[in-house]
Amino acid sequence: MNRVVITGMGAITPIGNDVESFWQNLLAGQSGAAPITKFDSTNFRTNFACEVKGYSPLDHFDRKDLRKYDLYTQYALVTARQALSDANLNPENINLEKAGVIWGTGNGGITTLQTGIEEYALNKNLPRFNPYFMPMILSNMASGIVAMEHGFKGITYTAVSACASANSAFMDALNYIRLGKADVMIAGSSDAPIVDNVVGGFNAMRALSRRNDDPTKASRPFDTDRDGFVLGEGGGAFAFESLEHAQKRGANILAEVAGAGMASDAYHLTSTHPEGEGAARAMKQALEDANMEATELDYINAHATSTSQGDISESKGIATVFEGNEKVKVSATKSITGHLLGAAGAIEAIACVKAIEDNKIPPTINLENLDPEVPYADKIVFHNSIEQEVNVAMNNNFGFGGHNAVVIFKAFDN
C-alpha cells in the first residue's frame, strides 16, 4: 500500500485564523471563550462560546458567492485554500482525476437553516426563501464546493459522524490514497454551530457549561468542577498525498499519516461507554493499522470535552491501552479552543502535527483539581506547554451515536 504524508495545513479557529497563530496561542494557553456576539443570548442558560474572531467573509468571497455559501462552507473553502497554498499544490502539478475532497461536519449549514426559519416566522403571509437555501444547508456541500473551486475530479464526499467527523474524513482519505484510488486528497472538517437552536438544544441537555461569570475558565477537562463543554466553531484542512506523489514534485513533508481506527460503542444515544470500551478498541485498531506498539506513542490529544462522563470514560480507555507506556503525555486542547463539534478533530490533528514538528506539547488549562477517577495524573500536561520529543501523536474523537475515531500521525522518515 502507498504511504500517506501531509504536505499542507490550514486553520480557522477561536484562537487564530491560520495555523501558526492557532498553534502559538494554543501553546500559550490563550482561551478562546468570550460572550456570544452572534445572537442575543440573554435569555439562554449559557451566554458565552468560543467564536472565531476577526473573520470577515468579504475578505475571502464576493457578495454573489456569499449568497450561496453557509458559514461552515466558507470555513471549509478558506482552510482548504490555506492547505493547498502551504503544500504548493495547484491544478498544473497534479492529476485532477486523482485528486479529491473528503470533508467532515457535524451540522452542515445550520446557520442558514436558523436564518431561514427566523425569516419565515417573520413573513409567514409571504414566505420567501433564498433560492440557494437547500444546497446551503446540505452537509455534503462544502466538499463539493471545495472540489469545484480547485477542479478536483476524484473521490469527493462528506463524512458525518458527529464529533468524530474529522477523524472519519482523515481515515477515509488515508485509505483511498493507500489503495491508489487517489494521489491527493483535501481532508478536513468545519462547523459553524453558534446559533440559537444549537445553544438552546445543548442547554436543554445540560451539556454546556453555565460558568457565565468567567467564560475563560469554563472549559476544564478532567477537573472535578467541570460543568459541561464550551461550544466552538471553525475548521481545519490538510493536504494528504501519496509519498511517491509528494516526493516526485519535491514537496515539503510535514508528517506521515501512520494509521487510523474506528469503532462503535453500540451503547447509548449521547453517552460514551462508561469504561471507554469503544474508545479503547478504536485506539487499539489505530495502533494495529499503524503497525505500532502502544509503547511507541509520545502524545495523545484527548477528546476530553469537559463533561462528567465523557472525560472519565476516555481516560479509562487510554489507561487500558497505554498501561506500561511511561513516556506518553496527554492534553485536552478543548480547554483552550472549546468544542468545535464536527470540526474539533481537524484543529486537534493540526495540534498533533505541530507537536511533532516542534517537539512541544500544548497544555490543558483550567485543570486545578484533578478528578480522582482519572487514572493517570502523571501523564497530563496542564497549566503550561512542555518541550518533549514527539515522534508519534494520536488524535482521539468521539461522537454522539457511539462513534469513536482515532488517527495516528508520526514524524516522517524516509
Image (cartoon, rainbow, N blue to C red):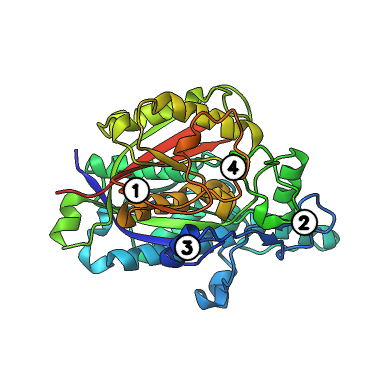
Residues 256 and 217: in front is 217
Residue 213: mark: 2
Q: Which mark is in front, 4 or 3? A: 4
Amino acid type for the residue under numbered disc 3: Phe
**Element under disc 4:** loop
Q: How many marks?
A: 4
Which residue is denoted by mark 1 in the rendering? 155
**Which sits earlier in the primary sequence, circle 1 or circle 3?**
3
Q: Estimate the spatial distance between the alpha carbons at disc 4 and disc 2, rounded to whole Å.
A: 18 Å
Q: Estimate the spatial distance between the alpha carbons at disc 3 and disc 2, rounded to whole Å.
A: 25 Å
Picture residue at 28% right of the left edge, 29% below the top: 293
Q: Estimate the spatial distance between the alpha carbons at disc 1 and disc 4, rounded to whole Å.
A: 37 Å
Residue 22: mark: 3
Which of the 4 image quadrants contains residue 214? bottom right
Q: Estimate the spatial distance between the alpha carbons at disc 4 and disc 3, rounded to whole Å.
A: 20 Å
Q: Position of residue 328 (x, y in %)?
A: 37, 38
Which residue is denoted by mark 4 in the rendering? 221
Q: Which mark is in front, 1 or 2? A: 2
Picture residue at 35% right of the left edge, 31% below the top: 325
**Which sits earlier in the primary sequence, circle 4 or circle 2?**
2
